[in-house]
Amino acid sequence: MKILVTGGTGYIGSHTVVELINAGHTPVIVDNLSNSNIGVLDGIKSITGESVSFYQVDVTDIQALDKVFSENHDIKGIIHFAASKAVGESVKEPLKYYRNNLVGLMNILECMKKHKVGSLVFSSSCTVYGQPDILPVTENAPIKPALSPYGNTKQICEEIIRDTVASCEGLHAILLRYFNPIGAHPSALIGELPLGVPQNLIPYVTQTAAGIRECLTIFGDDYDTPDGSCIRDYINVTDLAKAHVVSVDRMENGKQESDVEVFNIGTGRGTSVFEIVNMFEKVTGVKLNYKVGHRREGDIEKVWADATIANNTLGWKAEKTMEETLASAWKWQQSLK
Ligand code: UDP
């Protein structure tokens, strides 16, 4: 099937494009290259042997987006990644986030209606749960007030999709609520390319190990967790990518139980920051320079997924171990030298 992937040269997008090709689909990428570069297409080609068709288009430009749909009449589904994703930046520039994330999605939905494309996979986030009252968190947990404009856009996007699907015959969607994607393709030909100083844990860890950053700061060791550091559910990016492939197949095969389905995409395992540091050192043999600092504002103490519904209904399961995932992140970092 021909699948339009917005944000297809980005971190999760590029890994998903590879998995779509591996599954026999034909991806078409739309990306404005605001947080990725064209060289990612070479990485995808080296891994898969395929040249993917690419449009440098901003999803907030509805005319340009409409043209992509017109030129690709046989698009069967959309995987919509293109969005701004830095929590801190979203606090400083909320309008950028509301424009890119909400207008981008609305344009996609307009084009889907006009060109009669029925299936949408949307990148949502476990951020919609805030600090859950019950762990592991299930899809039925209440949506908590968002802690940032970024988080708010994910909540509003979910609502926009629900309302639009309810109003439009033939439109359906799968919302994937990701936990913390990490790692890189095992080939190290594609991976995460953070701009400037990384905000996320794993790129900071690998850059510190590579000597690019002097010292990792662990944000707080006085949380109510066994070792005092925060707990997250870290999911291998290739495993995460595969969840998108099974989602498009599920929709196209008419297997959905309702027109909008929601799945947690995580491992079901919680890992603390200290555990990550220790595992990274063990797997790579590199000693990490780190210190304990203050808590980071807005951080959630602990969250990990109940992925039972994704496992049973979607038939998807996280397969990679944390060790191989950390090793892949390190291999990728070293390839950037
Ligand atoms: N973290 C840290 N030092 C860093 C970056 C992150 O201790 O330099 C911690 C952060 O407090 C959180 C975990 O690592 O507990 C994951 O943070 P990240 O920003 O990667 O993802 P988040 O879950 O916040 O979206």
Image: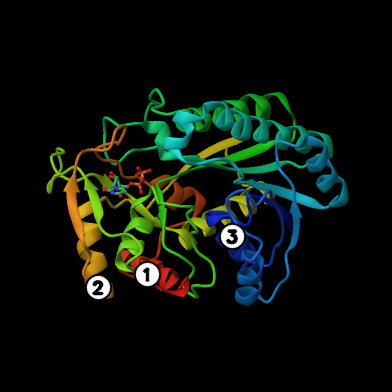
Q: Quadrant of residue 261?
A: top right
219 or 159: nearer the viewer:
219
Amino acid tagged 3: Ser
Amino acid tagged 1: Trp
Q: Looking at the rendered structure, which numbered label has been put on residue 14? A: 3
Q: Where is residue 126 shown, x and y percent of the image?
A: 41, 39
Mark 2, ligand 1, within 8 Å: the answer is no
Q: CA distance from mark 3 to mark 1?
A: 18 Å
136 or 70: nearer the viewer:
70
In the displayed structure, does residue 115 sit left or right of residue 263? right
Colour scheme of the picture: rainbow
| Mark 1 Cα-neighbour bin, 10 Å: few <14, some 14–19, many ≥20 | many
Looking at the picture, does residue 265 appear above or below residue 103?
A: below
Give the residue number, with chain letter if any, for mark 1: 330
| Mark 2 Cα-neighbour bin, 10 Å: few <14, some 14–19, many ≥20 | few
Residue at 73% across / 28% down in the picture?
A: 168
